[in-house]
Image: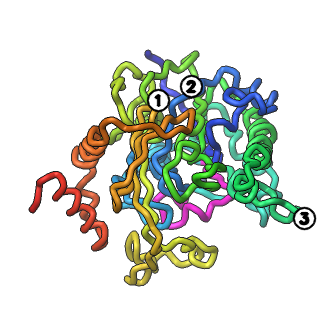
């Protein structure tokens, strides 16, 4: 597949956008304008995020690395490991015009790419009440200006625009009463608003044939018995998200049967832009699907050992220099979350294997049917997970700083493998 390099990139992240919140996968979705605008886009059917949380997941999109490699093991880890190239910086270094806009820009606080992301509407106090005009005028650069743009929509995040409506139900209680379909209607309505209004208004302004566009979820949303939102476990509704792609000169992206991961965007996008990176991660260039092994397993990770509730507005306003490491402020460790968990999962796109790292409990589940099944060989997945950890080309970054807890887990892992007594 040869083509001239592309020089306009648009990445759109819809927070909590799960696989069934799209007309192509769900006939309940009524988004005719969005469907028309994106009719030539390819939908990846087996696409998975690396983490069930906004910060680690986006960091994987922008670096091509798994959480254990980039350092944001979970949502409340404060910083990335140092020295990791990210898409914003790479494109800025190449002279691209950068647009980074979010309905909740402060969620990226303390991360390397934070300086590139501002509000969707800088004049609006409440982003959901803001205008798209400022953003659209920034997107409309002369046709020969190379552009890298990232947009992040938050309206689909917990609350789904229901706050302030008298009598608005809690989705958790609806699910508990067996009214999951009713709960889903509220969530779907928020996703429809983003697709059918905001994305339509933006996409129709662009000369789409010249733009490489990637529309994806940063994670999905549970809205099921196992979890209502997204942060507490690795669940198929949370990890399996849509990815819509449009690449100039590529009529239809020929995706592999194997699962693909959020980490695949980094090598794909830098390849399209002809940007040389010394990338040595597990991400695969989606333009060369034949190089993706049929037996590929993709990883997701969850770590909530620290500071649940830490990301309050007050903490997010803290000066940068007070964050002294990934888990310390003013050199003091942020509080532990006593009920915190550390989980990992691997999927082949059809089945998902999940293990609790502290208890060894596991589940094996069909992704689309959300059905637990017997796992004949858990060791196969444990070995595959160990291989991913041990063969990572970024293990040296973990030495930058590790907490006693991390060291303990690392040692336990090595002990299990027989590397140490
Ligand atoms: Zn998110």
Residue 89 makes an appearance in the image: no
Q: Quadrant of residue 42?
A: top right
Residue holding disc 1: 272
Q: Residues within 10 Å of mark 3 (few under 14, many from 20)?
A: few
Ligand 1 contact, mark 3 (Cβ < 8 Å): no
Q: Position of residue 369 (x, y in %)?
A: 57, 33
Return the disc, 3 or 1, that comes first in the chain's sequence. Answer: 3
Describe residue 164's horizontal placement relative to residue 86 as left or right: right
Q: Is residue 420 above or below residue 49?
A: below
Comes first in the chain, label 2 or label 3: 3
Asked which secondary structure carries label 2, the reply is loop
User: At 50% from the left edge and 55% from the top edge, which residue is drawn?
Assistant: 233
- Which residue position holds label 3? 166
x, y percentage for residue 249? 55, 18
Specify whether tag 2 is near ligand 1 (CB below 8 Å): no
| Residue 29 against residue 184 in the figure, above or below | above
The quadrant of the picture showing ligand 1 is: bottom right
| Viewport quadrant of the N terminus | top left
Identify the secondary structure beneath mark 3: loop
Which region of the structure is painted magenta?
99-115
The answer for how far apart the CA atoms under marks 1 and 2 are is 9 Å
Q: Which mark is residue 247?
A: 2
SS of the residue at dot 1? helix
Residue ID at (34%, 27%): 295
Where residue 256 sits: x, y (%)? Answer: 44, 22
Say which residue appears at 55% left-offset and 58% top-offset.
231
**Mark 1 or 2 closer to N-term?**
2
Query: Is residue 206 visible in the rendered structure shown here?
Result: yes
Q: Residues within 10 Å of mark 1 (few under 14, many from 20)?
A: many
Position above or below: 35 against 225: above
Question: Which label sits on residue 340?
Answer: none
Q: Tell me the distance, in whole angstroms, between the alpha carbons under discs 3 and 1.
A: 49 Å
């Amino acid at each position: 597949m040869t083509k001239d390099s592309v020089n306009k990139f648009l990445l759109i992240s819809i927070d909590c956008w799960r696989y069934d919140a799209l007309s192509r996968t769900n006939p309940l979705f009524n988004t005719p304008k969005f469907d028309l605008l994106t009719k030539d886009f390819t939908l990846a059917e087996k696409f998975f995020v690396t983490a069930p949380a906004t910060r680690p997941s986006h960091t994987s999109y922008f670096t091509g690395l798994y959480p254990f490699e980039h350092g944001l093991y979970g949502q409340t880890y404060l910083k990335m490991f140092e020295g990791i190239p990210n898409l914003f910086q790479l494109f800025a270094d190449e002279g691209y015009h950068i647009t980074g806009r979010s309905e909740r820009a402060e969620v990226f606080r303390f991360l390397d790419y934070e300086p590139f992301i501002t509000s969707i509407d800088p004049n609006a106090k409440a982003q959901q009440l803001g205008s798209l005009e400022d953003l659209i005028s920034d997107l409309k650069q002369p046709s020969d200006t190379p552009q890298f743009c990232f947009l992040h929509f938050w309206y689909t995040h917990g609350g789904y625009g229901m706050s302030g409506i008298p009598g608005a139900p809690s989705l958790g209680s609806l699910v508990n009463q067996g009214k999951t379909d009713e709960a889903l209607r509220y969530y779907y309505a928020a996703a429809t608003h983003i697709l059918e209004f905001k994305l339509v208004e933006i996409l129709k302004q662009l000369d789409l044939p010249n733009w490489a566009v990637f529309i994806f979820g940063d994670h999905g949303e549970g809205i099921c018995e196992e979890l209502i939102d997204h942060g507490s476990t690795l669940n198929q509704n949370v990890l399996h998200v849509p990815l819509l792609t449009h690449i100039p000169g590529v009529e239809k992206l020929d995706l592999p049967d194997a699962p693909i991961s959020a980490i695949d965007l980094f090598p794909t996008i830098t390849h399209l832009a002809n940007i040389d990176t010394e990338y040595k991660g597990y991400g695969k260039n989606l333009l060369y699907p034949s190089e993706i092994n049929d037996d590929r397993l993709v990883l997701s990770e969850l770590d909530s050992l620290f500071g649940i509730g830490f990301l309050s507005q007050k903490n997010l306003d803290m000066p940068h220099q007070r964050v002294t490491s990934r888990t310390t402020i003013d050199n003091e460790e942020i509080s532990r979350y006593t009920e915190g968990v550390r989980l990992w999962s691997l999927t082949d796109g059809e089945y998902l294997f999940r293990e609790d790292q502290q208890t060894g409990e596991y589940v094996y589940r069909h992704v689309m049917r959300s059905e637990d099944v017997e796992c004949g060989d858990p060791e196969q997945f444990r070995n595959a997970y160990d291989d991913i950890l041990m063969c990572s080309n970024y293990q040296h970054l973990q030495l930058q700083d590790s907490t006693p807890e991390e060291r303990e887990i690392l040692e336990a892992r090595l002990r299990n493998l027989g590397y140490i007594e």
